[in-house]
Image (cartoon, rainbow, N blue to C red):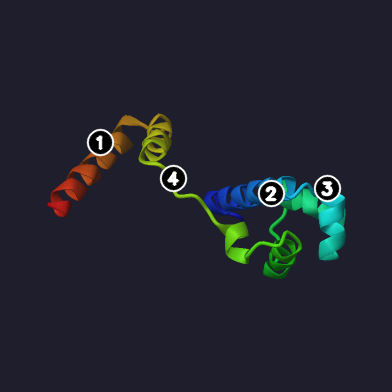
Amino acid sequence: MKTQSDKEFLKKLGRRIRKIRKASRLSMETLAYKCGIHPTYVGEIERATVNPSVLSVVKIANALNVPICEVIKVEEKKDEDIVNEILGHLGKINKKELRFISAVAEKLTEWEK
């Protein structure tokens, strides 16, 4: 089963492949042909509905003429995005859980000093 972070990684991977493909002015069909994979599979990878094999990602990188690290590069989140993500989670929990998280955060800030 895919975790939320797995799903997020696959979405970023798909967006990255689509961005590089479009910058290279390749259609999904042309990329698929160059990779030796089905065009539908390229679309599924770009939409993050499948978890592609490492070999498929290597084939895509080669077909796009970019190093594999360029395809799987994941941008690090900005502090503001992380804070907003945390706030989104906090809005979904009860007061008891909020107090617990507050206590943990307090201990973490003490620990850092």
The Cα atoms of the two marked residues, 2 and 1, are separated by 36 Å
Picture coordinates of residue 69 (x, y %)?
Answer: 57, 63
**Mark 3 surroundings within 10 Å by alpha-carbon count, few (fewer than 14), some (14 through 19), many (20 or more):** few
Q: Amino acid at mark 1?
A: Arg
The Cα atoms of the two marked residues, 3 and 2, are separated by 18 Å
Q: Quadrant of the N terminus?
A: bottom right
Q: Relative to 10, does residue 105 appear above or below in the rendering?
A: above
Picture coordinates of residue 97 (x, y %)?
Answer: 32, 38
Residue in the image at 73% along x and 61% along y: 60
Q: Amino acid at mark 4?
A: Lys
Q: Which residue is mark 2?
A: 48
Tags 1 and 4 in contact by the CB under 8 Å rule?
Answer: no
Which mark identifies residue 27?
Answer: 3
Viewer-nearest residue: 69 or 90: 69
Pick whichever of labels 3 and 2 is earlier in the sequence. 3
Picture coordinates of residue 21 (x, y %)?
Answer: 73, 50
Q: Nearer the viewer, mark 2 or mark 1?
A: 2
Picture coordinates of residue 9 (x, y %)?
Answer: 57, 52
Residue in the image at 36% along x and 31% along y: 94
Q: Secondary structure at mark 3?
A: loop
Pick whichever of labels 2 and 1 is earlier in the sequence. 2
